[in-house]
Amino acid sequence: MYRRINSCLSLLAVLSVLLTGCASAAQPPKTDGTVSVRVGYLLADLHHIGYLVASDPEAGGGVSFYEQNGVIVQDALGAPYANGGVVMDHFASGDVDIAFLGAPPAITKHLNAGVNTEIVAQVNTIGSALVVGPDIQKPEDLLGKTVAVPGHAAIQFFLLLNFAQQHSLDIGQITVVDMPPPDMRVKLESGEISGFLAWEPWPSDAIVAGAGKVMATSTDIWPNHLDCVLAVDRTFAEENPEAVRQFLKAHIAATAWMQDALADPDSKEYKHLVDLAETFTQRDAVVVEEAFNNIAYQSALDTDFLDSIRTYTSKLIEFGLIPQEKLSERGYTDPNDFVGKYVNVTFIEGLGTP
């Protein structure tokens, strides 16, 4: 589902723009100080609902969080994207200024392909699950079977590698295929795949439909793991540092609003968040409410995040997803040096992150 979100539009106007399918294009800074930002995000990924929340006037009390902070947002060319690897490809093509995506593709595409980005905020922690069909009763049953992930650059493939390692499974004996998450439940029901590891709401969608069962949540695989981040094109950030800070202010406000809404399921804010999530994912309320139970929204680049991303990077090297020599080729001495330089905390410092 393609979405053209502009912070000065109401939700109905957004849907109207969606129907027209109009193309995204770069816009110059406005004379009143506002800046147009081309935003990348993933298709129906409930981790990225903060983009819609920050664009929504009702969530902002009548004026969207982006508008309140003098930022005009528009979907980047081709957004929403199938997975984080595609997001990074569009960064490389010059189509994206700021994007929501998983940490692994942000890391791997930067190191392996030299995509000129940096991480400036978190989006969420946890929020994925390995769902299996009735023929799978224990991890060993996955051997010789087919399991789908959103992409080999996605965090879900990384989590599947971890799951296989934890259970002494030879990943080479599992056929791992890339598949758009909206297709996964149907393929599981048909028996074309025996399982999938995807972001929410697609695990909850399969569970609510009775198509499969959860073999492991991403928290089971890696407790309290980091997940999606906000990455920015470094050239854009250098040329528009205040726009990045203002975008982050809106992101922080939207994250805090979601945290408060989820903490009070009886509130009108919670109901509105569920409504937005239904629109964003095209899933009904029972699915998105189940999915919200498996996601934690967070924006801060705190010590836990920095420690986790060091672990991520070391694991990516261990799994062979990043050759060790790529660190030095990109100017980093080791994972610690990489994290210190690739995670740019200066934009978000002092903004009061939740």
Image (cartoon, rainbow, N blue to C red):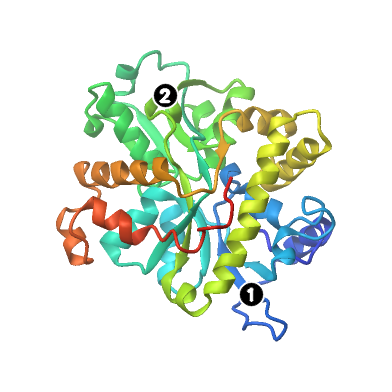
- Which residue lies at the image location 59% right of the left edge and 52% below the top edge? 352
Residue at 44 percent of width and 28 percent of height: 219
| Residue 354, quarter of picture | top right
Relative placement, left or right, of 8 versus 44 is right
* Amino acid of disc 2: Asp
Q: Residue furthest left?
A: 325
Q: Is residue 234 left or right of residue 144?
A: right
The residue that appears at 70% across and 71% down in the rendered structure is 70
* Outermost residue toward the front in this view: 350
Secondary element at image label 1: strand
**Splitting the image into 4 quarters, where does residue 220 fall?**
top left
Q: Is residue 34 above or below residue 247?
A: below
Front one among 29 and 305: 305
Return the x and y of residue 107 as percentages of the image width and height.
34, 55
Measured from the top left, where is residue 86 in percent x and y?
44, 59
Q: Which mark is residue 220?
A: 2
Q: CA distance from mark 2 to mark 1?
A: 40 Å
**Image position, residue 93 (x, y; %):** 43, 73
As drawn, which residue projects farthest toward the bottom?
31
User: Is residue 6 shown to the viewer in this render?
Assistant: no
* Residue shown at the point (68%, 76%) measured from the top left: 34
Badge 1 amino acid = Ser
Q: Are marks 2 and 1 in contact (CB under 8 Å)?
A: no
Q: Residues within 10 Å of mark 1 (few under 14, many from 20)?
A: some
Out of 291 and 65, give the one closest to the viewer. 65
